[in-house]
Image (cartoon, coloured by chain):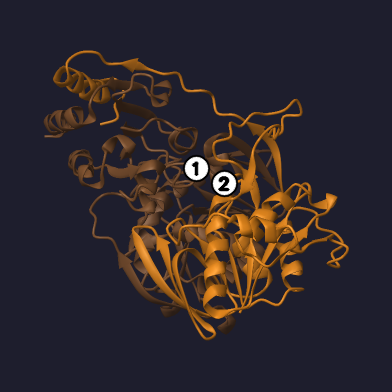
Amino acid sequence: MNILVCMKQTFDTEAKIALNAAGKIDGTGVNLVINAYDEFAIEEGLRLKEKFGGEVILLSLGGQSVETSLRTGLAMGADRAVLVSDPALAEADEWAAAEALAKAAATIPYDIILAGRIAVDDGSAQVSVRLAEALQIPSVSSILKLDIEGAAATAVREIDGGTETIEVGLPAVFTAQKGLNEARYPSMAGIMKAKKKEIKTVSLADLGIGDLAPKAAVTKFSLPSPRAGGKVIPGEPADAAKELARLLREEAKAI
Amino acid sequence: MAKGIWIIIEQSNLAIRKVSLELLSQGRILADQLGEPLVAVIPGKGVAALAKDVAPYGADKVIVIDDDKLEKYTTGAYTSALNKVIRNGGPRAVLLGNTAIGKDLAPRLAQRLGVGMASDCTGIELADGAFSFKRPIYGGKAFAEVALKAEPVLATVRPNTFPVAEPDASRQAETANESADIDAADLKAIVKDIALAVSLRPELIEANIIISGGRGMKGPENYVILEECADVIGAAVGASRAAVDAGWREAKFQVGQTGKTVSPTLYIACGISGAIQHLAGMGSSKVIVAINKDPDANIFTVADYGIVGDLFEIVPLLTEEFKKLVS
């Protein structure tokens, strides 16, 4: 079974966000890691490989810095990686990213595509679903469980207020929700092996893509106005609780 | 006069979800600014009766897509049906709630329509006929304003972003029935089972009040004190990443950058230190309360009201006070 896993390099979730002089997100000194949800996707891919054999191929999009995160994924146990890297993708929106990934995926034999349900940076949660549409295959979002039997998959996915079980034929795209599995850490042996694994970098021209003018553009970044700490309510627990309830009703009008 | 703002109505058990009413209410304001109609689109099975429920919230027209194949939501069937109706109708903008369905449906629909999309928006501005969508990024640590270059513009909107308008029972809307006309290729996924959790508490993302517990809860057995409090004030119960990673609560209850981002009217954080990724997920709450025994906990820097003390003592007392208020 050939398992394609899409992953994105993102800021560590502990990172504070600041804007640079140009008003863009400032990445200076930020720790870059594999998007947390994509780690679940990689882990699920590795488990499928352990069960059915085949290859786990990582697919990402971005600059050369992404190689360090791909190396981490390879150290977890993935076999090889493809990085779509092109200056023309600097301002790529979700549509352009999906189109480029779809063209790259078409060059790789796959039976299943896994990805995180959302990236913790832009939080759009669009690209994987768009990728499925671009490849004209089904997708199942936000999965908590995945069983494969032959060319059929049964996935349990999170819906509002519960879960839903979906049956779908392969190939299909599945996006991982927290709870699907616990991602492994790379072992020392895995890290050593990963150094020799292939990371193939391809440009848009390599994929036969000409124009990918984005359909969405960020016109402005801003930071939330900082919340000021409010009042700490003093007194014995019973008095403090009573005062808090009163303030929530009368002052904040929140109860 | 054509174009217009279209709202994709989401229903559950033939009751319209609150976020759809929020979108109709805001959609009415935007449609008036444009001088164009507000259209409610209701896909589903047996949903024709819901048409009368959307008119009071401002819809000028209701498009009902009633089909057996739309009884249960599937990505393919809904994309297929809506893609055709949207292509025929040519709206200026299509808005959906950022719910489990909206999050899954909107990107696929956007790709099929070949347009850009703004996800999980918390603001919509209209200037000279052009939309600007404001959306949280980095889990709420920053905001991006997004312009979309092709019509129709598509956006999902975070629940609790816009208020629901007072319904006007005298408003009338014309109803049009459209056939679903679903392509066979879009019927590849089958819903085998839906398991809804037996909970009378509101959904985390739609709740007006959330009471959350973190590491300070000390164990899964102690969440009952939050649940008791929640049930008095109609709140949802959330958890921090620390509590979820410890296995005390299911991941679906996690609030934060790697969980749910929420904007309730009131957020009560109990035994939560206030890690940056947690604050990102709840920082847009209108009122924040912190109960923590550590006076230096970071959560107090964002809390409107705080009590320094033992949550096991304070929460039950607070529950009793809430009982007096709501009775």
Estimate how packed mark 2 is, as few (under 14), some (14 to 19) or many (20 or more) residues with alpha carbons within 10 Å. Answer: many
Per the image, label 1 sits on a secondary structure element best described as loop
Q: Which of A90 and A69 is in front in this view?
A: A69
Amino acid on which the number 2 mark rests in the picture: Val
Indicate the quadrant where residue B121 lies.
Answer: top right
Where residue B201 sits: x, y (%)?
Answer: 25, 50
Is label 2 in contact with label 1 (beta carbons under 8 Å)?
Answer: yes
Q: Is residue B180 left or right of residue A5?
A: left
Q: In this view, does A56 lie to the left or right of B221?
A: right
Q: Is residue B116 visible?
A: no
Chain B display color: brown
Image point 30% across, 64% down: which residue? B196
Where residue B304 sits: x, y (%)?
Answer: 36, 22
Q: Mark 1 points at which residue?
A: B257
Chain A display color: orange
Q: Mark 2 points at which residue?
A: A120
Amino acid on which the number 1 mark rests in the picture: Gln
Q: Residue lying at the far top in this picture: please name it.
A: A235
Q: From what the image shows, is residue A26 above or below residue B309?
A: below
